[in-house]
Image (cartoon, grey):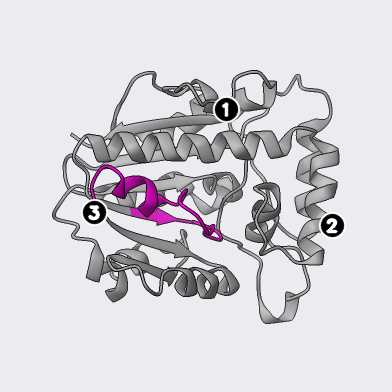
Amino acid sequence: MERSSDRHSTDAAAQAPSVAGMYDFYAGGEQSRDADRQAAAAAMAALPGLDVAVAANRAFLRRAVRHAAERGVTQFLDIGCGYLAPGDGNVHDVARRVVPDARVAYVELDPAGVAHNRALLRDTPGTVAVQGDFLKPHDILTDPEVGAVIDLDQPVALLLVAVLHFIEDKDDPWGKVAQLRDALAPGSHLIVSHAYIKPDTGSGPDAIKGVYRTFGSSLQNRGPDETGRFLDGFTLLEPGLTAMADWRPDPDTETEHPMSHTGVVAVGVKP
């Protein structure tokens, strides 16, 4: 269920697995390195069906973006976007099927991911890819490249999809989301997905946490109550807080595999 920015990619640890690279591997992308693939294989062994959960997460993102665009939102701020994928499944691709001139700012911490995204978007007007840290909301909101495509005086769809579960409680992710919320205009949407495996699911939750811990990443398993706090100040759209495949499924939504119904997702609107 991870799609977040890589909080541990530095020059000194260039050969360590990265969260963004592992997610790319789960999703069937081509940007992962050997270290990413090895760690991802260990995570998938610890929690079988993880790739199914990632696919369900990506499908939720597409449905939520489409819905926001159908409600008139024309600009999207995607924080912790990871590696964009060639093809037509990225936020700008989905939004522009509804709003042809939709503008998108992609924010990623991993420098390799930023470089990849910039190259992919080189010939795509109305989009930018910047390096930014969720833990520094002010820096993201005041980034001049972000400001070139995102007008905070108009409604924005803020995407925090599979990023919050990498932020520990001690770093106050709820406070960081509140800072972002307070900068948004009324009518803005918050699109959230968060990893959640029910505690009674055998050893899977602890085992996958252990895989990420080996390279210094902390994976949080927050349930609906804790995840719901990220939507404080927003009016939840139906069906509220739910599992990934259960948020406004369409005919193409995978519903058979149990891992499609993990995680906690929601979309809220700022009054």
Residue 150 in view here? yes
Mark 3 or mark 1: whose residue is earlier in sequence: 3
Q: Which residue is mark 2?
A: 38
- Let me know if residue 150 is in the magenta part: no
Q: Position of residue 228 (x, y in %)?
A: 44, 29
Q: Quadrant of residue 165?
A: top right
In the image, which residues are magenta?
Answer: 77-100
Magenta highlight on residue 95: yes
Which one is in front in this view, the residue at disc 2 or the one at disc 3? 2
Residue sitting nearer the eye, 63 or 153: 63
Residue displayed at 69% across by 62% down: 18
| Quarter placement of the C terminus | top left
Q: Nearer the viewer, residue 126 or 79?
A: 126
Q: Nearer the viewer, residue 61 or 233?
A: 61
Q: Is the Cβ of the residue at disc 2 closer than 8 Å to that at disc 1? A: no
| Residue placed under numbered mark 3 in the picture | 183
Q: Residue at x 34, y 48 (%)?
A: 158
* Residue, disc 1: 223
Asked if disc 3 and disc 1 are in contact, CB closer than 8 Å, the reply is no
Q: Magenta residues: mostly which secondary structure?
A: loop
The earlier-in-sequence mark between 2 and 3 is 2
- Binning the other alpha carbons within 10 Å of mark 3 as few (below 14), some (14 to 19) or many (20 upward) gives some
